[in-house]
Image: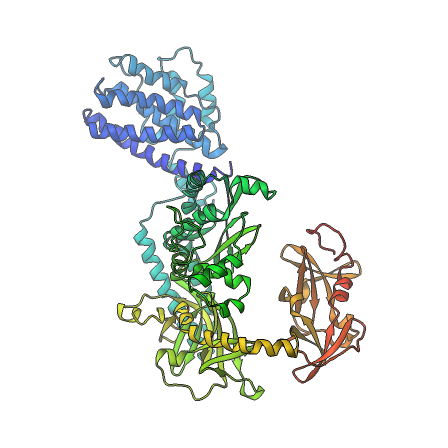
């Protein structure tokens, strides 16, 4: 019933609307019995209710409407004429249909409502059109009480009146009753389905969204002004305004949201037909189809999603013979999964097929000139697989009516990025492929990072921002140049840079120091955007650009900031393409440095933490996440500490206690922690400070250790101790490395 709940609700709402219209049409038909147009309209309405009730297995409702449909068919075809008897029978039928719908709404079933007397009454009108009219029907406003009088019909004397009379009290009150109860503080508890929804024009919703956007802009301006005035009363009022605006924005956005099921509904047929054409057996699994997305984005996502599904069936899932030979189920599984994460909607298309072979992709890229041999040598498997998004790229052995021309994946990527989203792919040879679409909840209001370059302010959509780096002249950090292209050494790797002032033709900055680098991920590239200042993160309202600014190619829209100034929204994919030249210079430099790096030793990646005056390094590979836990969330179970984290109970170890530094316990409401996860188990390591992440060559190392340490080394001109991570994990969870169910976490 839960699966059909939404369908039944829509059926009830539509049927109640249709019944109200039927009451009006039948009364009007009595005044104009020969109106073929009105008869056809009434017939179609009854036919719709009958068809849907049959699909939902409401057999009494189906039988009753079928009888009415038979009478209306004779009236429509001119076999008999409309008379008071026929009108009364049809109106009585409408009344009982309404009682049945009320029973369905209350109990989920048709209950014990007796429909036979009304069916007999309608049948009598068909068999003897000239028969005299029965007792007058009750007024339309008293539809439910009319059902009580139904047993008095003489057309079915063999039916005892007890059953329908007993049902009468169970019928809902007349339509006027709920309306009278609403002001009494019932909060809609007894409101019927028909009264709980209304139809609203889409243009009105768009107008509301535009007004909310303007309200958000005004809210931002007021909040910025209040910060200057520093009036406590005005501050409280502004906070209240901020809360109301946020709730109003969320409510209006919900009216525009539609479940992604609307665009998934046609995919089962697509998978069925395509798998049959390709000679494959594919089972489609859909998870999270109730996940909602702004209606303006549904159409933009429809075509890319369809292409990825077709590609998964054609390229991903193997034939039954190949799967059987590989020890797999001959029937492949294609999973569609949608969920909310970080203010976005994530849509995954996963298959359990053969996966994408990076070597084959590399050979194809080399043959088609998409990448050089030197470029491929510097790429990892994930970067190589991402080459499938390049225009004209295809690994298909032959061109078919399904695929093979290389015009699919680049269009998917372009369409998703045009709406501010991103597309990624993960694949394991022999295990399958997962395509992941990251889609914003709405295009109207987004989270953005505001930056300044010279005297101008710009907004960067936060979906593409990875991290922020400050190039501090006092620490000796600086922007380097390789073959004339600016780069920055970020944790041992060269990051290609794009100077925003040069790109937009602004006056050049004075130096390459004391500037900010916004590390962005877009168009399959990771690059840094050099700006003068980072201002704030805030919700912005996206305004479309005029045709002239669109031709520039560096802007995705405009917005109004809290100070009333207009700021242009930067188009990160366009900036990523401008970073291509710098990226080529970086690749050449890294190739030249590769041999020297191998001679000097291996580069290590470490997380530097602070425990009092001591610096302790943790291998970055042992770090799953960095978190901050509220002190009051850390609880005791027996002699150990634990914390609730993502539906798990994590054992906690304080490194200060492990290393014997008891006098430097963290103070404050929160404590930083390093979370390590493996095989479904997690451990939280509490530290005092997160200092830095280092990716560098460690030239000096000492084997001198202490309890809980494996040695020490020199990092950033300071002696840094190396944590014995295994000992720390065993101190928190002695069973971590034993053979226990992966879903269990030691407490």
Q: x, y (%) of residue 238?
A: 45, 69
Q: Quadrant of residue 395?
A: bottom left
Q: Nearer the viewer, residue 638 or 134?
A: 638
Q: x, y (%) of residue 116?
A: 41, 18
| Residue at the image point whose x is 45% and y is 73% from the top | 234
- Classify 448 as above or below 514: above
- Classify 81 as above or below 395: above
Q: Nearer the viewer, residue 141 or 478?
A: 478
| Residue at the image point whose x is 24% and y is 27% from the top | 39
Q: Nearer the viewer, residue 462 or 488?
A: 488
Is residue 532 something one can see in this rendering?
Answer: no
For the view shown, which residue lies furthest in the front direction?
367
- Classify 615 as above or below 746: below
Is residue 497 something one can see in this rendering?
Answer: yes
| Residue at the image point whose x is 38% and y is 16% from the top | 152
For the view shown, which residue lies furthest in the top direction?
158
């Amino acid at each position: 019933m839960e699966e059909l709940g939404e369908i039944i609700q829509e059926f009830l709402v539509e049927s109640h609307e249709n019944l109200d219209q039927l009451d009006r049409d039948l009364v009007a038909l009595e005044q104009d019995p020969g109106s073929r147009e009105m008869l056809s309209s009434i017939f179609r309405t009854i036919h719709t209710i009958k068809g849907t009730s049959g699909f939902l297995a409401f057999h009494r409702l189906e039988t009753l409407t079928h009888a009415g449909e038979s009478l209306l068919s004779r009236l429509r075809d001119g076999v008999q004429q409309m008379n008071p008897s026929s009108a009364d029978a049809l109106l009585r039928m409408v009344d009982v249909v309404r009682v049945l719908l009320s029973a369905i709404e209350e109990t989920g079933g048709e209950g014990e409502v007796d429909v036979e007397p009304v069916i007999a009454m309608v049948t009598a009108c068909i068999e003897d059109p000239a028969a005299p009219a029965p007792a007058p029907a009750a007024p339309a406003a008293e539809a439910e009480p009319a059902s009580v009088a139904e047993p008095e019909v003489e057309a079915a004397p063999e039916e005892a009146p007890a059953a329908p009379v007993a049902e009468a009290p169970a019928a809902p009150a007349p339509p006027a009753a709920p309306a009278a109860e609403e002001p009494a503080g019932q909060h809609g508890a007894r409101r019927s389905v028909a009264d709980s929804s209304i139809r609203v024009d889409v243009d009105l919703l768009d107008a509301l969204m535009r007004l909310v956007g303007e309200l958000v802009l005004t809210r931002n301006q007021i909040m910025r002004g209040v910060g200057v005035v520093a009036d406590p009363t005005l501050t409280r009022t502004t906070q209240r305004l901020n809360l109301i605006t946020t709730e109003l924005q969320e409510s209006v956005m919900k009216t525009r949201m539609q479940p992604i099921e609307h665009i998934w509904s046609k995919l089962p047929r697509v998978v069925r037909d395509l798998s049959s054409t390709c000679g494959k057996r594919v089972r489609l699994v859909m998870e999270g189809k109730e996940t909602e997305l702004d209606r303006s984005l549904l159409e933009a996502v429809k075509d890319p999603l369809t292409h990825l599904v077709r590609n998964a069936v054609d390229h991903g899932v193997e034939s039954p013979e190949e799967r059987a030979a590989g020890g797999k189920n001959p029937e492949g599984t294609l999973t569609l999964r949608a969920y909310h994460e970080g203010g976005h909607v994530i849509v995954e298309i996963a298959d359990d097929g053969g996966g994408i072979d990076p070597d084959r992709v590399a050979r194809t890229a080399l043959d088609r000139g998409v990448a050089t041999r030197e470029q491929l040598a510097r790429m990892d498997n994930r970067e190589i697989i991402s080459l499938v998004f390049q225009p004209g790229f295809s690994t298909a052995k032959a061109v078919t009516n399904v695929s093979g021309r290389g015009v699919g994946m680049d269009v998917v990527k372009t369409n998703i990025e045009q709406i501010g989203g991103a597309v990624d792919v993960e694949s394991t040879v022999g295990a399958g492929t997962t395509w992941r679409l990251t889609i914003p909840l709405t295009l109207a209001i987004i989270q953005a990072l505001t930056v300044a370059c010279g005297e101008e302010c710009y907004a960067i959509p936060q979906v593409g921002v990875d991290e922020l780096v400050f190039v501090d002249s006092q620490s000796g950090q600086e922007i380097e140049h390789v073959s004339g292209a600016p780069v920055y050494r970020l944790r041992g790797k060269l990051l290609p840079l794009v100077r925003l002032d040069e790109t937009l033709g602004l006056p050049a900055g004075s130096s390459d120091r004391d500037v900010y680098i916004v590390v962005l991920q877009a168009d399959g590239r990771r690059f840094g955007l050099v700006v003068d200042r980072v201002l704030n993160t805030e919700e912005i309202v996206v305004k479309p650009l005029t045709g002239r600014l669109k031709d520039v190619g560096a802007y995705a829209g405009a917005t109004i900031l809290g100070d009333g100034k207009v700021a242009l929204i930067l188009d990160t994919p366009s900036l990523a393409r401008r970073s291509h030249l710098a990226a080529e210079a970086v690749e050449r430099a890294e190739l030249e440095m590769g041999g020297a790096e191998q001679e000097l030793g291996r580069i290590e990646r470490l997380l530097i933490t602070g425990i009092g005056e001591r610096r302790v390094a943790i291998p970055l590979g042992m770090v799953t996440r960095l978190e901050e836990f509220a002190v009051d969330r850390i609880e005791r179970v027996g002699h150990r500490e634990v914390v609730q984290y993502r539906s798990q109970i994590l054992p906690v170890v304080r490194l200060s206690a492990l290393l014997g530094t008891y006098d430097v316990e963290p103070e404050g409401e929160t404590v930083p922690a390093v979370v390590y996860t493996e095989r479904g188990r997690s451990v939280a390591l509490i530290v005092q400070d997160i200092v830095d992440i280092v990716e560098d060559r460690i030239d000096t190392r000492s084997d001198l250790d202490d309890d809980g340490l494996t040695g020490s080394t020199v990092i950033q001109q300071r002696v840094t101790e190396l944590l014995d991570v295994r000992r720390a994990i065993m101190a928190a969870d002695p069973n971590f490395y034993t053979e226990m169910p992966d879903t269990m976490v030691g407490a």
